[in-house]
Image (cartoon, rainbow, N blue to C red):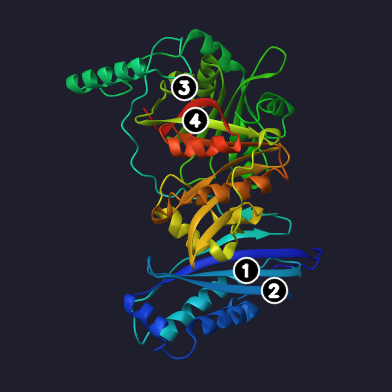
Amino acid sequence: MVDVGQKQPSHRRAIAEGAVHASAAAFAALRDGTVKGDVLAAARIAGIMAAKRVPDLIPLCHTVNLSRVAVTLEIDEGRGHIRITAEVEAQDRTGVEMEALTAVSVAGLTLYDMLKSVDRSMTIEGVHLIEKHGGQSGSYLRPMQVVPKSPPPEPILPETDTADIVEDWTTAELDAEVAVRSVELLFGVAAGARSHHRRPSAQARKLADHVTRITVDDPTLIARLGPDPIGCAYMLGDMDGPYAEHGRWWGLRGERDELEGVLLVYEGLSVPALLTSGGTVEVEALMLAARAELPRQFYAHMRLHHREAVDLFYDLGSTKKMIRMGLRKGDWKQAADSAGVFELSHRDTGAMMLLYRHYPDNFFEPAQLDTGLYFGLREGDELVSVAGIHVFSEKHDVAAIGNIVTHSEHRGKGLASHCVAALLEALFARVTHVALNVEVGNDAAVACYHKFGFREHYRFIEGNATAW
């Protein structure tokens, strides 16, 4: 056994999760009570008992003085599984990850045992650690997983070989782009091929010599991003807390050592994300200098004038036209009440994932619930509306809200407004600036946010990028 005698006891906490997939017959037996005993209660108790017996089950595991074990089971018949979550805490010299994982596993085995007379084809799947806290290694949060996205829209964004790029698109520009795309299709020219054959500019090649890797505690990075908390909300948020460990940063330094451009690759998602700050030539220099270390594929999030720089090295393909909106605490309007809205917890994880899977283009990870910044509404026993965050940083006084969805059968009732009202009330007790992204054309969402005081800050594009 590893000697932990020299370590000081500290608070340890771990959360694990898994699921048992079962047939319709098994769920019917659960509902009708035609199987032996209280299945869920037995599985819950078995999981708690298993957490206390880990040293007897797994060789060389330490005996840990557990202070709390909680096992919850959520039936999700629509997706055909019973989700199991175990949360374990202790004040000791070593962690409790194995206790949480064992609790989930044994609870799953107990479900199988109780239901096998009805369904022997059941499977126990996806047992994994969501998060752990305490000890010398600090905190671990399972990387956020992007909920599978819906097919992107047809490209309608203008490409240009000139440096004079505007921040917005007129109807004439869009019509012109449609014509260009038609010619490309007619003659078999691949989208993006025009900029692919352009070489990096001489100015960008010169500036690339001044690009270096930087860290989130670099004061010049904060000086660059801090003055625009709404525009740089995601970058600022990714500098803080559990987000920071997933980021790789590059900076272009000017003559006075200030940063003239910044590039971030955030790898906390199933697909890396790339965010940029600076002028067209500055971003071109950053891409040129960092290209050997950039992922082959990423999800790009950039101002329109940065596309010209990214197009040199990556095929952006289809993109979406987006709006960054922002709100300062002093401009906040309480446009809806929060009656009936409740704070979501890990007990609601299954219901939230079920709701999000019906509405792609959102990402959610259960570890985000620890912020206390997810709110929802139920009708009966069904979770029908949710509002939460993408990033949150008290250190940098900013948050970005997102993952806001309402079940299609309950739209038109203002449920999202009630959830957003509760979310903003909680946020403005802790930060001054709140940002959000909304797709151009989603007029209902834009109108909803306007009521709270949000205003358009700038327009940008998003899309999947693949190296040429």
> Which disc number belongs to residue 298?
none
Residue type at tag 1: Glu
Q: Position of residue 10 (x, y in %)?
A: 78, 63
178 vs 442, left or right, is left
Residue type at tag 2: Arg
The residue singled out by tag 2 in the image is: 68
Viewport quadrant of the N terminus: bottom right
The residue singled out by tag 4 in the image is: 323
CA distance for labels 4 and 2? 45 Å
Among the two numbered marks 4 and 2 on one chain, the one whose residue lies closer to the N terminus: 2
Among the two numbered marks 1 and 4 on one chain, the one whose residue lies closer to the N terminus: 1
215 vs 40, left or right, is right
* Residue in view at x 72 percent, y 64 percent: 12
The residue singled out by tag 3 in the image is: 304
Residue 244 visible in the shown view? yes
152 vs 402, left or right, is left
Among the two numbered marks 3 and 1 on one chain, the one whose residue lies closer to the N terminus: 1
Viewport quadrant of the C terminus: top left
Among the two numbered marks 2 and 3 on one chain, the one whose residue lies closer to the N terminus: 2
CA distance for labels 2 and 3? 51 Å
Query: Image height check: is 276 above or below 112?
Result: above
* Secondary structure beneath label 3: helix
The residue singled out by tag 1 in the image is: 87
CA distance for labels 1 and 2? 8 Å
